[in-house]
Amino acid sequence: MAKTREKRPTSFYFLAAFFALFVLFLYGPMLTIFILSFQGENGGLTFPMNGFSAHWFGNLFEQQAVGDFGGSFLRSLKLGLIVMLVTVLVSFMAGLAFRKRFKGDSVIFYLAIASLIVPSILISLGIGLLFNIVSWQPQWFTSALGAHLTWTFPFGLLIMFAVFNRFDPSYEEAARDLGASSWQTIWHIVLPMVAPSLIGVAMFSFTLSYDEFARTLMTAGALNTLPLEIYGMTTNVTTPVLYALGTVTTGFSFVVIAIALGSVLILRHRKGQKA
Amino acid sequence: MSKRSSYFLISPMALIFAIFLVVPLLTIIVVSFWDYDEYRILPDFIFENYKYLLGSSVTWQIYLNTFKYAALTWGFTLLIGFTVAYFLAFHVRSLTWQIVLFMLCTIPFWTSNIIRMISWIPFLGRNGLLNSALMGLGIVDEPLEFLLFSDFAVVLADVHLYTLFMVVPIFNSMMRIDRSLIEAARDAGASGFETLRHVIVPLSKPGIAIGSIFVITVVMGDFITVRLMSGGQSASVGLQISNEIGLLQYPAAAASAVVLLVTVLLIVTALLRMVDIRKEL
């Protein structure tokens, strides 16, 4: 494409303004609660700020005040990590399988699409009923884990499709010609090449699970996950501690993204050094 | 790789879908014909749950309300999503800037949906920022009550939460449009608007269809946004199911769930006629 700098059309400025408004729309409310979470001790849920303090953050960690924030956070964290590992492994395997046609491949594909579009509350209800009928106790690491996987697998699979559709098989052929076994080919050639996308799958599945509410509703059993805890708080807590919780969890999400992006950059850097 | 290894590689995914998707959905269908009392669900084969559900005018009201939310959210997310994607794909010239601006849109997606919903409260509330501003400017004398705990709030929160689901697939479709087609349209004398209408919109259709499937199915099954943002004053199908679950009326909830599932599948089938998703990946 020629690199001549044309004059920008008038429509550019309208669209740019529209985009700016959209970004404001996305961030504005979040900024508000971020500011309000530093509300003074006697402040309420809305402006004006009644002083400035970290009181509500302290309040967050007193267990009796707002329920089991620490416990539910740890459970969500553990669940998210398990979901992440399982999703990465299983999607990678499925991605490899789908490079060849096999009997029933379209059944699995449409199951994944169905899994994506069936309303989450139905998954929750179905698994809850199933466990109820066979008299199993729902637990966050059994029924909720399964429920979350039905949500993360489709995303993992679709990302793997996108990756393998653009994958050049001649590298594998070269490896095979040099005498590599299929395990060695996958381990030394395929895996390093798709690693950044696998980190994408990991990041996606962790955050999807960490934030999943509807699919956890009937499947978590006796102990809450963090979204269930937050939901409980929205219905019975009327202090800025709610906003403090929002700020803390959002901050945590940002740390997770930073770690994921950081590892992608490190992988890229290493690859660059090797080449 | 042999066929056997394909089956080995796909089996974990197939197994999880079988146990946690297929069997539970079949369970819902079976239980929707069961009977129940205050304490238990009773295996049976009755049509009472469906008769009661479909014979009640409340159900039709709730469906109408849910369709209203879905249609409004769909319309707004499509308009905003298309415009944002169009700006990013055709007006932002460097790839770096495209990525930066795109990331800017995705960041809020990484925080909890419930937190994003409640973040509207200090803005829309009776003493919220918007009302204070409007009163301060003398535009209204009394706080506007319809802003929070209303249908308006529900649709606003839905648009806030789900516009990204439109931006991503439409942007993806637009990035695949061969730029020479647009030049050709311009050379043939098409105005910007004509190019948009006759070239870009038709070629973005797959993205529009995928985004629409996402937004509509999510809103059709939603109950949290409706409960939190309408302050319990409106209902949706999802909320009805969640209330029945709360009352332990599982067979009734199951019947509602089956009807919702059929509705969603019909909508998706209609939308899929527009696009072959497997080709889009």
Image (cartoon, coloured by chain):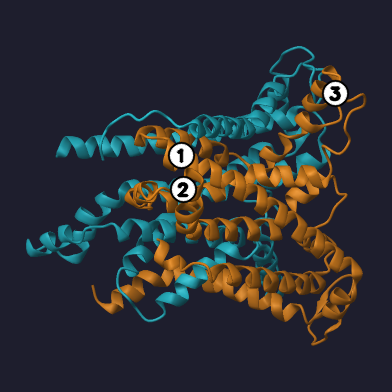
Chain colours: A cyan, B orange
Sequence-first disc among 2 and 3: 3
Res B139 label: 3
Task: Determine if marks 1 and 3 fall on one subunit.
Answer: yes
Task: Determine if marks 2 and 1 fall on one subunit.
Answer: yes
Q: Is residue B221 left or right of residue A4?
A: right
Sequence-first disc among 2 and 1: 1
Subunit under mark 1:
B
At which x and y percent is residue A22?
Answer: 60, 35
Circle 2 sits in a helix, a strand or a loop, which is it? helix
Instruction: In this rendered view, identify the residue nearer to me: A60 or B112.
Output: B112
Quadrant in the rendering for residue B278: bottom left
Q: Is residue A106 above or below residue B225?
A: below
Q: Is residue A32 left or right of residue B205?
A: right
Alpha carbon distance from label 1 to label 3: 35 Å
At which x and y percent is residue B131?
Answer: 83, 26
Asked if the residue under mark 1 is in contact with the one under mark 2, i.e. CB atoms within 8 Å, the reply is yes
Circle 1 sits in a helix, a strand or a loop, which is it? helix
Instruction: In this rendered view, identify the residue nearer to me: A140 or B101.
Output: B101
Asked if the residue under mark 3 is in contact with the one under mark 2, i.e. CB atoms within 8 Å, the reply is no
Q: Quadrant of the N terminus of chain B?
A: bottom left
